[in-house]
Structures are given as C-alpha cells and as structure tokens.
Amino acid sequence: MMKCVVCGSSNIHAKEKCKSCYGKELYYKRKEIVIQNCKEYRKTEKGIKIQKKHAWKKNGLVDSDDDNYEKIHQRYIDTTNCDLCNIKLTTGKKTTSTTKSMEHDHKTGLFRNIVCHKCNLKIRDIETPCKSNTGIKNITFTKRDKLYLYTKTNNGVIIQKSFKELDDAICYSVINDMIIKLESH
C-alpha cells in the first residue's frame, strides 16, 4: 500500500501525495507565480502609475475623481523644473534636494504644485507646525500645550500671547507689528 511522501497518510490523491499535501503544494506554486507576476507588473508603466497614485492617496493627496488624478499624473510627468525655484528636477528612489515632490495643502489634501524636495520642506515647515518652530517670525508652536505662542520685545517690554489657531496668531502678529510701527513714527 502506498503512503503520502509528505505526511505518511495512506489516502493517496495524486503524485504520491494525499489530497491535503497535494493541495498545499499547488497553493504555494500558484502563490509564487502570482507574486512574480505582481513584481513584473509593478515594473510596467501602468504599474508604476498605479503605485504613484496609491502613494499620493496614502500621503494625503485626497481626491475621489480619478480623472483629476490622470491630469495630476500627466502634469507630474511633464514637469521638469520646480514651480517655485525653477531648479531642474530629478526622479528616483533616493531623496535629494532636487527630487520631484507633490506639494499639497495638508489640511484639505488638495494638490497645488510640483516642486523640489527642498521647497516642499520649506512650505511644510511654514504651513504645518509639526516642529517646535513654525517658520513664521515671532510665532512658535508649543507641543506640550498645543498652542501658538506669539512673543515680541518692544522697547524692553515683552509682549506674549497664546492662540489655539495659527491663523489667529498670524493676524495678531501682523496687527501688533503695524501698531508698533505706527507708535514709533
């Protein structure tokens, strides 16, 4: 009586294996083929485009309209220079200061420009206060209190005020600077 060469079961199905062992072997062979096909597909132009689209959605470039993604992708492909500093853009897996980046509003998720990595970081630092400094004169972001802190010294007097919203802090800063300029004239 024949036994399964894998598990020793006496219930032979095909190729000297029981039904369970034969099924597992087929499953793993098909899985390897699928994985190989996926790897090959990701190297095609269409596969690269779909991967970019997925990464843009994952990174906050939100839009339910696929036609808009096509337009953005085409603009991404066609753009050779940074929209802000006009430096020649590069592409690739390694990020450098000239690497092509998708610049978008982090609150709404809407795409704005194709820029170099360096410009994208400058915009992000000003727009999103994720670091200790917002990049805006006299305004810092306190991580612990989650407040925007306006601090300025005028004629030896320290002016300090905190705000929950960045827009409020900026408005106060601009108005206060204008008042100080008017008082000094």
Image (cartoon, helix red, strand yellow):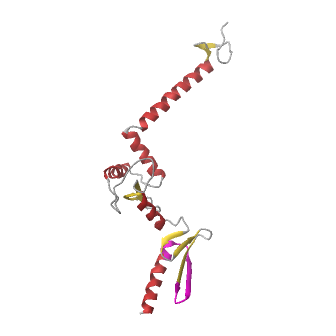
Q: Nearer the viewer, residue 42 or 153?
A: 153
Instruction: Determine the image quadrant of residue 182.
Output: bottom left
Residue 77 x/y as whole percent: 33, 49
Q: Residue 181's x, y, as percent?
A: 43, 88
Count the marks: 0
Q: Is 148 placed above or below 44 here?
A: below
Quadrant assignment, res 185: bottom left
Residue drawn at point x = 56 percent, y = 82 percent: 160
Q: Is residue 26 above or below residue 138?
A: above
Q: Position of residue 47 (x, y in %)?
A: 40, 40
Q: Residue furthest top?
A: 1
Q: Where's residue 74, x and y in %?
A: 32, 49
Q: Is residue 112 magenta?
A: no
Relative side of 99 to 29, left or right: left
- Indicate the quadrant containing the N terminus: top left, top right, bottom left or bottom right: top right
**137, above or below 154, in the image:** above
**Residue 165 sits inside the magenta stretch:** yes
Name the foreground residue: 60 vs 142: 142
- Give above or below for 133 relative to 24: below
Name which residue lies at 31% across and 51% down: 78
Q: Residue at 46% x, 66% y: name it.
A: 127
The magenta stretch spans which residues? Answer: 153-169
